[in-house]
Amino acid sequence: MQRESLEFLFHPESVAVVGASADPNSYGYDYLKHLIDYGFPGKVYPINIRRAEVLGLKAYTTLDEVPGRVDYVIGCIALTQVPALLEACARKGTKAVHIFSALGSETGLPEGRALEGEILKKAREYGLRLLGPNCLGIYCPGAKLSFGFDFPNEAGGIGALVQSGGSAIDLVQYGALSGLRFSKVISYGNALDINEGELLEYLAADPPTRVILAFIEGLRVDGREFLELLRRAARAKPVIICKGGRSRAGARCTLSHTASLAGSSGIWDTAIRQAGGIPVRDIDDLVEMAVAFSLLAPIRGRRIGTGGAGGGRNTVSVDEWEENGFEVTALPEVIREDFRKRGSRLWYCLGNPADRSIATAFPGDAFTVPALLMEMAKSDSYDFICANMAGDEHPHSLENYRRVMEEHVDGYIKLYKESPKPFFLIFNSRPLGIKEMDGWRWREIARLRTRLLGAGVPFFPSVDKAAKAINELIAYYRWRDEAD
Amino acid sequence: MQRESLEFLFHPESVAVVGASADPNSYGYDYLKHLIDYGFPGKVYPINIRRAEVLGLKAYTTLDEVPGRVDYVIGCIALTQVPALLEACARKGTKAVHIFSALGSETGLPEGRALEGEILKKAREYGLRLLGPNCLGIYCPGAKLSFGFDFPNEAGGIGALVQSGGSAIDLVQYGALSGLRFSKVISYGNALDINEGELLEYLAADPPTRVILAFIEGLRVDGREFLELLRRAARAKPVIICKGGRSRAGARCTLSHTASLAGSSGIWDTAIRQAGGIPVRDIDDLVEMAVAFSLLAPIRGRRIGTGGAGGGRNTVSVDEWEENGFEVTALPEVIREDFRKRGSRLWYCLGNPADRSIATAFPGDAFTVPALLMEMAKSDSYDFICANMAGDEHPHSLENYRRVMEEHVDGYIKLYKESPKPFFLIFNSRPLGIKEMDGWRWREIARLRTRLLGAGVPFFPSVDKAAKAINELIAYYRWRDEAD
C-alpha cells in the first residue's frame, strides 16, 4: 500500500508545476523545462497566476482549472502557500506532491515548525504523499523526470536517497562522470512525510535498483527500525550510506540544513556496518563505492596484478596497495618465460607492476602493459587486475601521444572484456584551468576517458580510493556469503 | 666547491644537445626545442652526425667541432656511446653533463652495471659532473631550461629533486595547476654521480628555494648521512619527502626503475619525521603539502571557520575537519548580532559553517558567505578560514551562475588579500570527459579556478587532503619553534 503510493512519484501520468515561471533564473522555470527537455511522455500543466502560456505550454491560473487528472504536483511556491495548494490537490485527486520550497522547520523558528505541522496534517487528512519540503525531488530517467539540466537520459542500476539537494546534484554529476547510471535519485529534504525509511524499503524492493546509495543528515524513523530496514535491504543489495552530521559541528549544521538531529561518528559507522551497510564519509565515497559495486564483478581476494605508465607512479602505487592491505604478488616465472618465447627482448625484467617505461626503448616488443596484465589475469596468482593511467607522459606530440595511448586504451578495453578476473583503472584527474580546457594533452586525456567510459571500463581517481572500495567489496560479499 | 660545480647545471652559458634530432617524436628534438621555446639566452649547439642544421640552428657533427666553450651537455644518445662523449666533453672543457639515456644498472644486467662503472670512472677522471643516467634532467625556469613542453615560464620558490622522470613531469604539471612555481626541479634518475644528498644540500642553501620537495626511490648516500643533511635542511626550510619503494613490492620496483635499494615503510616515515622532514605517500601529497607550505602563512592552531555552497557539502566538510582533529568553533554571538545590526534577515540562523544555501531566498541580504567568513577571520575564535567551492550548484543559466559565482570569487579574493588569518579554498575537481570540456558549466568552473589561481588564492581538492597538509604545517612550525 505504502509502496504503491510512492509509485506516483516515479511514474505519474500527469504532472503540474505550480509556480511555473518564464524567468529562466527560477526553479519554477527549471522544473517545467526539465519535463519538456527530458521528454516526459504524460500531460504537463504549468500553473501560473498571471500567464496564459509558459514555455510554449498552455498555463492555468490554479490547479482547479486544469481539465484532466493531475497525479503529481511539483510545488515551487512559498511554503506559506502550500496548505492552500494541498487543498486544491485534494479536490483534484492528486496522489503525490513534491514541495521544493524551503524555510520550514530547518529555520529553527517556531513559525516554520508550525507551518510544517499544518502541512503534514492536511496531507494526512487528504491522503496525499509529500516529498519535502526543502528538496529537489525526483530524478528518474526511465520516467523522464529530472531536477538537473545535464543529467544522463539513460537509466541504470543505482538508486539513491539524498537528503540534501546540492549533494544530490553532486552525486548524479560525479556519478555520471564516473560511468554510473541511475534508476532513481530522490532528494527528500526535511522528510516531513516520505522519509529515509520508506525510501530505503522502496529501493530495496525496486527491481531496476541494484545498488542503493544514501546520504542522510538525520533519521526521521526510529534508529532501531532504520537498522532493521537496512539489514533487510543489505541482504538484497549493497547499501552504501553517508551519514552527514557525524561530528558536533556537523550535528549543528544538519539542524539548520534539513532540521535533522544527528548522532555521533563512531556509533553511526558501527551500527551501519553491523546491519550490513557500508558506511562512507562523503559524496565522493558514495560514487566511488557505487563504481566498485555496480561496475565490477565480486572480488574475493587481495592479490593484485598491476602496472601502467610511469615507473615512479607504479612504485608508489604498489606501496599504496600494500599499505591498504593488498598483496602485490611477484610475477610467476612461467609468465616471464612465456614472453621470452614470444621473442620479447625485455622478458627478463618483466614484473608486477608491469612497467611501461622499460618498453620505450623497444618499440614493437611483445611486452606491452595490457599484454602482461592479460597474462596475470589468466594466472591463478591474481584475484584482480588494475592498470594505472595518467596524463603525466612525455608525449612529444599529439600524434605520438594519441598513437601510444590509443594502443593502451585498446588493450585495456580488450582486457576489460576478456579478462577472467575483474579489471579496472586508476585514472588520475587534474584540476584544469580554462587554458588547459583547450590544450591538446588535456583534451586527449578527456577523449580517452570518454572512450573508456563508453566501453564500460570502471575507474577510480587514486589507489587509496580504489583500495578502500575494493576492501568494502570483499567485505560485503564475505558478509553476504556468511549470512546466506 | 661541490656546490659551485652544480651551478653549471642550472646556469650554463652554453649548452650542446648531443643527439639533437629533427624527428619531433624524439627526446633529441625535445631538448633542443625546449631551449629554443623557453628562450635560453646562451649559446645552443645541436650535435647531429648527419645534419648540417637542426630546428633552424647550425648543427655540428661532433662536440669537438663546436667553435666556442660548452658548459653543459645534454646527452640523448645510447648509453654505450656515453664514455666516448665524456672524452669529447673533457677535451671541450665541459663542466656538467646530463645523461638522458637509460638501460644502465636499472636493467639488472651485469653489462649495464659495468657500463655505468666505466662512465663514472671517466667522469671522475675528467672532473665532469654527471646528472643521470636514466633521467629527464633540469627544469629551471629562471635559466630557461626545461624538460617539459608545457611548464610555467615564471620561476618560484619550490625546489624539487625527483628520482623518477614521469613523476617529475607529474609534479610540475599538477603543481602548476595548483598555483606552484618552481626554482629548480631536478630529475636525477640512477644518481651515478650527483645524488639526493648533494641535491638536498644544494637546495637547502639555494636562496630562491623556499620549500624543498623530494621523491626518492633509493638512497645513494649513507642513511645516517642523509638524515643529517635532512636535519640541517629542515631547519632552514620545510622538506617534504615521498619515499617510493616503501613496500616489499615497491622495493622490487625501484630496483628495476632507478636501480635503487629501498627500505621499509614505517622505518622511513619515522626516520624522516625525526629529522624534521615531512614524509608523504605520493606525488599528489607532495604538491598539496607544497601548496600549504608555500602559499599559506604559518597556521598555529586548529580552530577553523568555514562555509560555502551546498548545505550537505558544508555538513560533511565539518564532519571531516573534526575527524581530522580540527575544531569547528561555534559562531560567536557577537558576529550574529553584528549581522542583525547590518539588517540581515538571516542573522538568527548564521553559524559555522556559513551556509550559502540559506541565502538563496534572500538576495541582497547582508549575509554572504565571504562576508561572514571575513568576520570569522577578524575574530579571536578562529585560527584559519576555509571556504568550500564546488561545481554542484543548481545554476539555472550561465548568466546566473556567472553572476553568483563571480560575486563569491570576488569575495574570496578579497578575503585572501585582507583576512588577518590564513585563508584557502576547498575546490573540488571532477574527471571530465571530452563533452564536458566544452560544457559551459565546466568551462565556467575552470575559468573561476584560473581567476583564483591568478590572484594567488591557495586551494586543496578535498577536506581530507587540506587537513592532512594543515596538520603538517602546524607540526612543522611547532617543531621549528621548539628547535630554535
Image (cartoon, coloured by chain):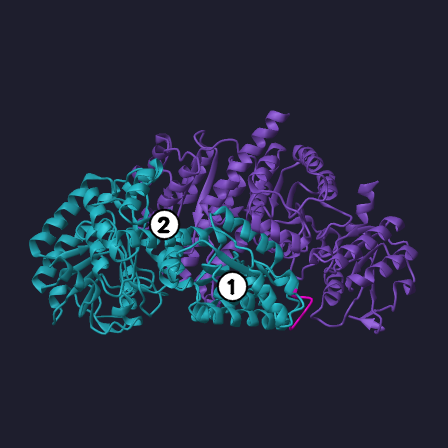
Chain colours: A cyan, B purple
Residue A185 locus on image (x, y percent): 29, 59
Q: Is residue B248 above or below residue A411?
A: above
| Residue B361 is a magenta residue | no
Instruction: Pick the residue in front: B162 or A90.
Output: B162
Q: Is residue A162 above or below residue A308?
A: above
Q: Which residue is drawn at the image coordinates 9% and 60% (left, top)?
A: A90
Q: Can residue A195 be seen here?
A: no
Q: Can residue B202 be seen here?
A: yes
Residue B237 locus on image (x, y percent): 65, 36
Magenta residues (range): A359-364
Q: Which residue is drawn at the image coordinates 68% and 53% (left, top)?
A: B258
Q: Quadrant of residue B220?
A: top right
**Which of the labelled discs sits on residue A217, or is there none?**
none
Q: Quadrant of the N terminus of chain A?
A: bottom left
| Residue A362 is a magenta residue | yes
Q: Is residue A21 left or right of residue B384?
A: left
Helix, strand or loop at mark 1: helix
What residue did someone put label 2 on?
A: B310
Q: Chain of mark 2?
A: B
For the stretch drawn in magenta, the main secondary structure is: loop
What residue did someone put label 1 on?
A: A376
Q: Quadrant of residue A23?
A: bottom left
Residue B158 locus on image (x, y percent): 65, 45
Q: Is residue B357 above or below residue B57?
A: above
How busy is the neighbourhood of tag 1: few (under 14 within 10 Å), some, or many (20 plus)? many
Q: Is residue B399 left or right of residue A226?
A: right
Q: Which residue is drawn at the image coordinates 40% and 37% (left, top)?
A: B322
Instruction: Pick the residue in front: B236 or B130.
Output: B130
Residues flagged by tags 1 and 2 on a common chain: no
Amino acid type, residue under disc 2 in the picture: Gly
CA separation, marks 1 and 2?
44 Å
Amino acid type, residue under disc 1 in the picture: Met
